[in-house]
Image (spheres, helix red, strand yellow):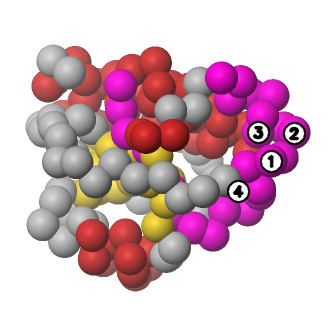
Amino acid sequence: MDTMTHDKPNLSTKIALYEPDIPQNTASIIRTCSCLGAYLEIIEPCGFLFSDKRFKRVVMDYIDEDKIKFYKSSDEFFEYKKKQRVILITTKATKIYTEFSFKSNDTLLFGRESAGVPDKVHKIVNEKIKIPMKLNKRSLNLATSVGIVLAEQMRQTKN
């Protein structure tokens, strides 16, 4: 798949995935972004190919190529975002997502399913928020987490 861009400035929320490694989750997130009007940014490398049959089965015809941007690395991503607000959704945060004040053009960053994001990313981001969960539970499914936080951001900003 060719690199796609959304270089036009906009006030839409951007969902960023850090090195996603489960094709079905990424495909589901693409569908969510397509249906709700959010842009998707993927920080490579991905742990799968977009020709993967598991990816294609879930994404179906929901892929809006003009609303997906690929970054070759986290360095490239953060260089591009240096004047924008990036919010990391992580189980290591103390702020709860419903108590956070979102803006229309925020970038919501989600870590890799198998490992989250490295410490260097934790140090770079502007803000960190979490979805509260029951004790002794590790994490929600990535696609579910994206839907939860994106819905709250849209509710707050009336997007």
Q: From the viewer's perspective, is the residue at label 1 or at label 4 nearer?
A: 1
Mark 3 — residue?
A: 55
The one nearer the camera, 109 or 5, is 5
Q: Position of residue 40 (x, y in %)?
A: 44, 44
Q: CA distance from mark 1 to mark 3?
A: 7 Å
What residue type is disc 4 on? Asp
The structure residue drawn at horizontal position 22% and vertical position 48%, both measured from the top left corner, is 8
What residue type is disc 2 on? Lys
**Is there a contact, CB below 8 Å, between mark 1 and mark 2?**
yes
Q: Which residues are magenta?
A: 37-61
Mark 2 — residue?
A: 53
Mark 1 — residue?
A: 51
**Is there a contact, CB below 8 Å, between mark 2 and mark 3?**
yes
Dot 1: element: loop
User: Is residue 35 part of the magenta span, yes or no?
Assistant: no
**Is there a contact, CB below 8 Å, between mark 1 and mark 3?**
yes
- Determine crowd level at label 3: few under 14, some 14-19, many 20+ residues with C-alpha closer than 10 A: some
- Determine crowd level at label 4: few under 14, some 14-19, many 20+ residues with C-alpha closer than 10 A: many
What residue type is disc 3 on? Phe
Q: Position of residue 76 (x, y in %)?
A: 38, 77
Dot 3: element: helix
Q: CA distance from mark 3 to mark 4?
A: 11 Å
Q: CA distance from mark 1 to mark 2?
A: 6 Å
Relative to 86, 39 lies left or right: right
